[in-house]
Image: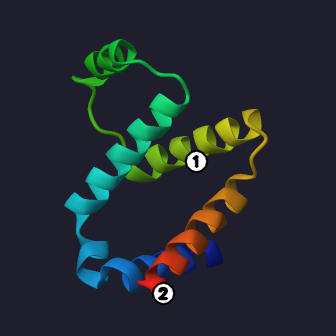
Amino acid sequence: MSEFQNRAVRLMVASVGDASTSDISVRRTNVLTTALELYVALGGSHEQLETAIAKKENDAPRRIDLVIGDLMMEMATISHIHDIDVMQAAHNALDSGFRETTSA
């Protein structure tokens, strides 16, 4: 794993605990809510979302590594469009989360 990934996991464990970090249902919910927040921030509508869900509803699930790869490519492209360094944004989020954890 990359140093960033290791640091992110350590911060998550420090802020929410190891049990929550390993809880796939929590991860699933967080991915969905964060993706929806990004979708709306990019100007997506509920109607477009419903259409996209309907198109994917009967598709067989793909391998998780391929889906993560596609997600990472989309994140890189969106970051490029908005002139944001994707890794710097991630580090900023980690640092912000760490400050919140240590000040609580």
Q: Residue 53 at what x, y percent from top left?
A: 29, 22
Residue displayed at 79% across by 41% down: 83
- Residue shown at 31%/74% (left/top)? 21
Percent of width and height locating residue 57 = 23, 24
Q: Is residue 92 left or right of residue 28?
A: right
What is the quadrant of residue 81 in the picture?
A: top right
Dot label at residue 102: 2
Q: Residues within 10 Å of mark 1 (few under 14, many from 20)?
A: few
Label 2, label 1: how far apart the Cα atoms are: 29 Å
Residue 52 visible to the viewer: yes
Quarter residue 95 falls in: bottom right
Q: Which residue lies under the disc numbered 1? A: 72
> Measured from the top left, where is residue 7 in percent x and y?
56, 80
Crowdedness near tag 2: few (<14), some (14–19) or many (≥20) residues, C-alpha within 10 Å:
few
Q: Amino acid at mark 1?
A: Met
- 8 with respect to 64 (left or right): right
Judge from the rendering whether residue 9 lies leftward or rightward of residue 59; answer left or right: right
What kind of residue is marked 2?
Thr
Residue at point 39%, 51% (across, down):
64
Q: Closer to the N terminus: mark 2 or mark 1?
A: 1
Q: Which mark is residue 33?
A: none
Quadrant holding the C terminus? bottom left
Secondary structure beneath label 1? helix
